[in-house]
Image: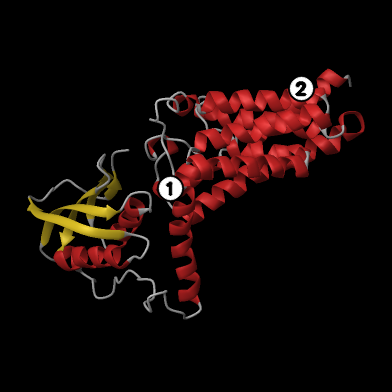
Amino acid sequence: MNPISQRILCLLLGYVCGNFVTGELVTRAVTGRPASELGTSGNPGMANVMYEIGFREGLLVLLGDVSKTCIAAGLAFYLFRQDLGMLAVIWAGLGTTLGHNWPLWMKLRGGKGVATTCAALVLTSPAFGLLSMLAGLLTVLATQLLSAGGVVIPLVFTVLAFLFLGQETGILGLVLTLIMIQRHFSQLRLIPSGQAEKTDVAGDAARKLRPLLDRVKEKYGASGGDGSAMPTLDTSGLEGAADKEKIRKGLRFHGHVQGVGFRYQAMNAARQLGLTGWVRNEIDGSVTMEVQGPEEAIDRLLLFLKENRWIDIRDMEAETLPLEARESSFKVEGY
């Protein structure tokens, strides 16, 4: 087989693996809705899933995206290592990123390819890949711009590749950099005006890790940092609740209630309690909910949300609303 055909096969092998968009599958499994309705970006990447659904789900997406890159790169290296060497790895990594960003089964509406790009670079050259990721991380911490960090990673690798790994590896690194610029262009163009979206990565990571650590402590009988264990949803004693008199409440929550999985925790808890209604994020950072069912069950839902240390409800507005006779489930609405 000629060298060009080998490179094309590595690229196609990666593209096929890249079409396994983990974020889309995880989002549908957890929420029953496509990732295009997740948050404001609709991106099926790790960061958006972690921000909108939860830390554990975000890690699962990361694991899937890295794994598919490893599988593609491993197969390509096994098949063509004698002729291409490590070039087989980066060609497959490029294909994986293309498949992740423009998957056929999602009508070419995929993610941004940060995880697959990082995995491809590390697999191609562990030292230079990790150094590039460190540069990207420092960029994000210094600027709070995820878009800038995403571009810096392949850009630094490209410079190192041209200097030490050869022209072809450098060119493929440049292609990955251009792809990253294209996927983040909507935010990159706002940087000069100061309007680009900023993210407190360190603060968000601490908030995401805290409930995970609390759950571990609870599992082994330890309490939280303030002496209280993580709350559990109490559904006992609600047998026959469907026959009790129902009410409908309109609620608006203020505080740290977005980006902490509030909506999907509320949805899952409401469904377990047999409640109906909806919940959505608002532009001002608050969360609006309408919930219908027995008053006791609604009170237990509110108690569960208020005692959750991941969520910080600082104020809540409530009103009684007319019942919705045709409503049959509880769902997440809006962006």
Residue in the picture at 71% in, 33% down = 157
User: Is residue 31 found left or right of 80 in the rendered image?
Assistant: left
Above or below, comparing residue 223 to residue 303 in the picture: below
User: Is residue 233 found left or right of 321 in the rendered image?
Assistant: right
Q: Earlier in the sequence, mark 1 or mark 2?
A: 2
**Amino acid marked by disc 2:** Ile
Determine the image quadrant of residue 14: top right
Q: Position of residue 117 (x, y in %)?
A: 65, 35
Along the line of sight, the residue nearer the viewer: 165 or 141:
141
**Amino acid marked by disc 1:** Tyr
Residue in the picture at 60% in, 25% down = 179
Determine the image quadrant of residue 246: bottom left
Q: What numbered label is drawn on residue 77? A: none
User: Is residue 62 found left or right of 77 in the rendered image?
Assistant: left
Q: What numbered label is drawn on residue 51? A: 1
Along the line of sight, the residue nearer the viewer: 236 or 193:
193
Q: Position of residue 203 (x, y in %)?
A: 44, 54
Residue in the picture at 61% in, 23% down = 178
Q: Which residue is mark 2?
A: 8
